[in-house]
Amino acid sequence: MERKDRIVQEFMSHRLVTEELIQKIDEKHLDYKPTETSMPAKELVTHMLQSFYTFASAAKEGNGEPFKKKPEETGTSLSELAKTYTEKTKTLLESFTDEELDREVDLTGVFGRKVAGEQLLQLAIGHEIHHKGNLFVYVREMGHTDLPLYVKIH
């Protein structure tokens, strides 16, 4: 299996769970946050979806420019936003070459260092996992008890 295929598989194993959790968020809970300093549910979900795409775009472009762009605002539901971002992120990940995965990406302006494209994608996966854990707390506090396993094996 190619490296990019393993990355896509790992991304999807977590993103499918993220999407399942997002589907449990009713519109009345979009502003919910478990603590005063937490992000509201809508902001957390939007951050997760847009951040992974930004990380992957920076790895693909080989520079930190995608971190400087303001993500597009959208009026669609969180579930629709998740489907859109998942598909375009998956397509982007599938397009990577080994050279792009190995290429050094200068992120000194963002993270204070340079990283290989593949390392940046692993950071994106770690970021998704971190916030997915937050999302489990949000959804449970919204009253849901039938929750998915933390990863989908497919």
Image (cartoon, rainbow, N blue to C red):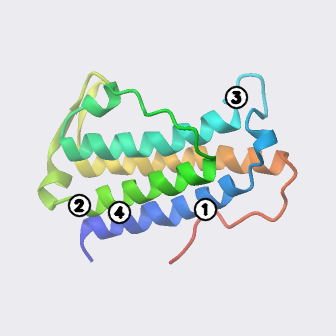
Mark closer to the observer (1, 2): 2
Local secondary structure at mark 2? loop
Residue labelled with disc 3: 38
Displayed quadrant of residue 20:
bottom right
Residue type at mark 3? Answer: Ser
Mark closer to the observer (2, 3): 2
Q: CA distance from mark 4 to mark 3?
A: 29 Å
> Is residue 111 visible in this depiction of the protein?
no
Q: CA distance from mark 4 to mark 2?
A: 11 Å
Residue labelled with disc 1: 17
> Is residue 148 visible in this depiction of the protein?
yes
Which residue sits furthest front? Answer: 75
- Left or right of 131? Residue 96 is left
Any mark on residue 143, and which?
Answer: none
Quadrant in the picture for the N terminus: bottom left
Return the residue nearer the eye: 84 or 12. Answer: 84
Residue labelled with disc 4: 7
**Which percent across, then down, holds residue 149?**
67, 67
Q: Earlier in the sequence, mark 1 or mark 3?
A: 1
Local secondary structure at mark 4? helix
Return the residue nearer the eye: 69 or 36. Answer: 69
Which residue sits furthest left? Answer: 99
Q: CA distance from mark 1 to mark 3?
A: 21 Å
Q: Residue at x 19, y 42 (%)?
A: 61
Mark closer to the observer (4, 1): 1
Residue labelled with disc 2: 95
Q: Residue at x 30, y 24 (%)?
A: 112
Q: Earlier in the sequence, mark 4 or mark 2?
A: 4
